[in-house]
Amino acid sequence: MTTAQTQELDVQPTPLALLLLGREADPRSERGVECPGDLPAASDPDLVARARAAKEKLGNKVFVLGHHYQRDEVIQFADVTGDSFKLARDAAARPEAEYIVFCGVHFMAESADILTNDAQKVVLPDLAAGCSMADMATAEQVAECWDVLTEAGVAEQVVPVSYMNSSADIKAFTGRHGGTICTSSNAKRALEWAFRQGEKVLFLPDQHLGRNTAVRDMGMSLEDCVVYNPHRPNGGLSAEELRAAKMILWRGHCSVHGRFSLDSVNDVRARIPGVNVLVHPECRHEVVSAADHVGSTEYIIKALEAAPAGSKWAIGTELNLVRRLANRFAPEGKEVVFLDKTVCFCSTMNRIDLPHLVWTLESLAEGTLVNHIQVDKETETYAKLALERMLALP
């Protein structure tokens, strides 16, 4: 990172050694998702002791949040675990904590900054921990899309609904245009609310969650949905197609959940007779249609908690969580396997490793603020408006 970039971001630069551990990614570039086959070896055990010592020194001044998809070596230091929105709300419920260390990805830290008070500092241990899905919708692209909808004469009928997995800019756009945010748990309620406000929905940025909710949960047809491609003129859609559509889906997806295929489902059923296939709604429509159960990360955990001993489960979500669940429920006689044969972690989420966490905690303990995530006031105002609309959903 250059000096100019560091000054613009108003953060302390990440040391070179940690950038190398993060594969030298530019935090300003689009974050891709790789499938390396396995995680790197566990960190130096000395780092565990250092993390404990720094966290103990900070005491109640620090509150560490750990997303479900984080690796175990990081999760062990989390004060709470959960999905992105739960963690952001947990942070807001701890006003006495001066530092919120968010072990997740960039949009999650932004949401925590929006919901916490001005005295709290939200910190992301590695600025390169992004989300490829969130990066698939930029503020400029979405503004251009709204111009296309306006030219087609449908903008006044459109209510934007943005997934929690989006940048603060996109949340603010949603708030400005009368829309709401949703999670994978309340997407149906958000869409029902939106269709009471208008005739059409612009769903950002995950096409699969939007399509699955509209078709599977609300009884719409696939023909009611069109996909807006920001890389094509007018989104690749005619004015007639926009006027006929009920759901205008942004061409975005989760690169991990998008890997699961119908072949994955058929293969695991052939290999494990009687298996229950449980997938996240960010998966493709054909995968969701073929699954036995569909739900959010929290839903997946609760389903396995309630499952009878001896039951068999193939889970279509990020591998860190699946492995953790497999280990947790093995003593109860529950078999939990990853849906796909190809091992695939979310490599951007896994940038938050123990070296980065130790550097962050030790820096804070020494009084040095690093990787401070701040959302500007105007963006925060409109993004919070959209989030508040979600919180008010019936």
Image (cartoon, rainbow, N blue to C red):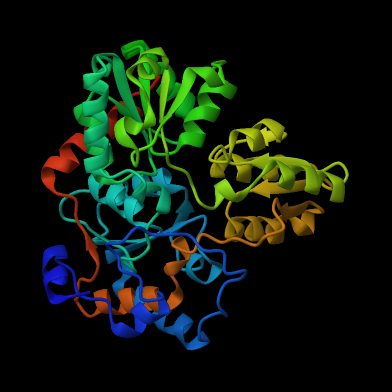
Residue 158, how many percent across, how many down?
Answer: 30, 19
Q: Quadrant of residue 170?
A: top left
Specify the quadrant that holds the N terminus: bottom left
Q: Quadrant of residue 86?
A: top left
Look at 39% across and 39% down and name the residue there.
205
Give the vertical position of 124 relative to 325 (above or below).
below
Q: Is residue 272 visible?
A: no
Residue 13, how many percent across, how many down?
Answer: 22, 76
Number of on-image labels:
0
Specify the quadrant that holds the C terminus: top left
Give the vertical position of 131 relative to 164 (above or below).
below
In the image, 3: left or right of 62?
left
Residue nearest the observer in this picture, 78 or 252 = 252
Residue nearest the observer in this picture, 132 or 9 = 132
Residue 169, how many percent across, how many down?
Answer: 23, 43
Residue nearest the observer in this picture, 230 or 51 = 230
Look at 40% across and 54% down and name the residue there.
131
